Image: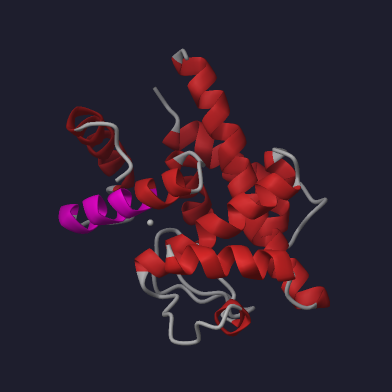
Amino acid sequence: MNWHHRIMALRRAACACLLFLAAAAAQAQDAGADPELREVLRNAATDAPSFTDRFDAEVWLTDMSRRLERQVRDPAERIELLTLVHMEAKRVELPPELILAVIEVESNFDRYAVSVAGALGLMQIMPFWLDEIGRPDDNLLHTDTNLRYGCTILRFYYDKENGDLRRALGRYNGSLGKRKYPNKVIDKLSRKWFQA
């Protein structure tokens, strides 16, 4: 697969991931939690390396670390975050660059972010999911937990929307049918995280 096809595949996957989380939040708020998504999250919360070899890991981590430097100053913290993003994205078969774009739009890499609606952490997960899946002690401000939930939700919406990344991102954000949020994520993805 050439680089252009890989980027396009990653873009499609990224869009799908974002839509997944929005849909979960919207569904849960509007009509109670989706029982199918509840089960997917429950399995992900109890499940989990993602690079094919050391060289691939070093190249990707070095490149992405440089791109993330403005938001996360500490090099060790950047590498830890990038490693977790890569692992969770690969676990759900989404491009890690898509997840990075979603995080940038959702929280600008503030792991302690809290939205006006009460969504928490890097990927802005709604806390009601903890009770919905029977894991009330999970801490959504912990990076690994937040990424596990967020990536799982986005993948669910991507699949639910049959690979339509824009719709999946809209669901993730709770803005299905509107273009603003999906466009922001896709713009970040193409301008920052997928640059050659």
Relative image position of residue 131 (x, y in whole percent): 59, 85
As for residue 79 lying within the magenta part, the answer is yes
Q: Which residues are magenta?
A: 75-85
As for residue 19 lying within the magenta part, the answer is no
Question: Which image quarter is the C terminus in?
Answer: top left
- For residue 51, which quarter of the picture? top left
Relative image position of residue 78 (x, y in whole percent): 25, 53
Can see residue 173?
Answer: no
Residue 28, above or below 40: below
The residue sitting at 47% across, 68% down in the picture is 45
In the depicted view, which residue is nearer to us: 153 or 36?
Answer: 36
Left or right of residue 37: residue 61: left
Colour mode of the rendering? secondary structure
Left or right of residue 155: residue 85: left
The residue sitting at 68% across, 68% down in the picture is 25
Q: Main secondary structure of the magenta part?
A: helix
Residue 54, above or below 136: above
The residue sitting at 50% across, 41% down in the picture is 93
Relative image position of residue 133 (x, y in whole percent): 58, 78
The residue sitting at 60% across, 59% down in the picture is 153
In the depicted view, which residue is nearer to us: 153 or 103?
Answer: 153
Q: How many marks?
A: 0
Can see residue 77?
Answer: yes
Farthest residue toward the top? 2
Residue 97, above or below 123: above
